[in-house]
Image (cartoon, rainbow, N blue to C red):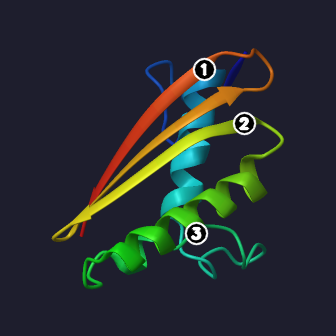
Amino acid sequence: MSQVAFPFRIGPDGRTASVEYEAHLRDLIEQVLFTTPGERVNRPTFGSGLLQAVFAPNSDELAATLQYLAQTSLQQWMGDLIELNGLTITAADSTINVTVQYTIKLTAVQQTAQFIRTA
């Protein structure tokens, strides 16, 4: 089952590029994590706002807040597609490293995805 690729692009055949379902879910998780709430016009609560904290002072409280924001956002927006098994967020200097462990509900396959963003 193929889905539209993210970011949107044209494939080598001149049509909309597509990816397999597992890669599509990874792309959706990335969108949820790194979209700032209010960024999408018709979905003002979509996203987690992790990128807003890139320049915040690093502390245990910040790590706990980021963990909570990401976990609740993923459960809200992806809860019908995945089961969240684990989430680890580390912030160092201007870099956020997010590791998500999840199970795809449709296939019961466990996946791990890592995302790194630098501001």
Q: Which residue is mark 3?
A: 69
| Residue 57: x %, y % from top left | 25, 84
Residue 92 occupies quadrant: bottom left
**Label 3 or label 2, whichever comes before in sequence order:** 3
| Residue 45: x %, y % from top left | 72, 76
- Amino acid type at mark 1: Gln
* 68 versus 7 height, above or below: below
Label 1 to label 3, Cα distance in Å? Answer: 22 Å
Left or right, 66 with reference to 59:
right
Residue 58 occupies quadrant: bottom left
Label 3 to label 2, Cα distance in Å? Answer: 16 Å
Specify the farthest residue to the left: 93
Label 2 to label 1, Cα distance in Å? Answer: 9 Å
Viewer-proximal residue among 25 and 74: 74
Which element is circle 3 on? helix
Q: Residues within 10 Å of mark 3 (few under 14, many from 20)?
A: some
Q: Which residue is mark 1?
A: 110
Viewer-proximal residue among 86 and 79: 86
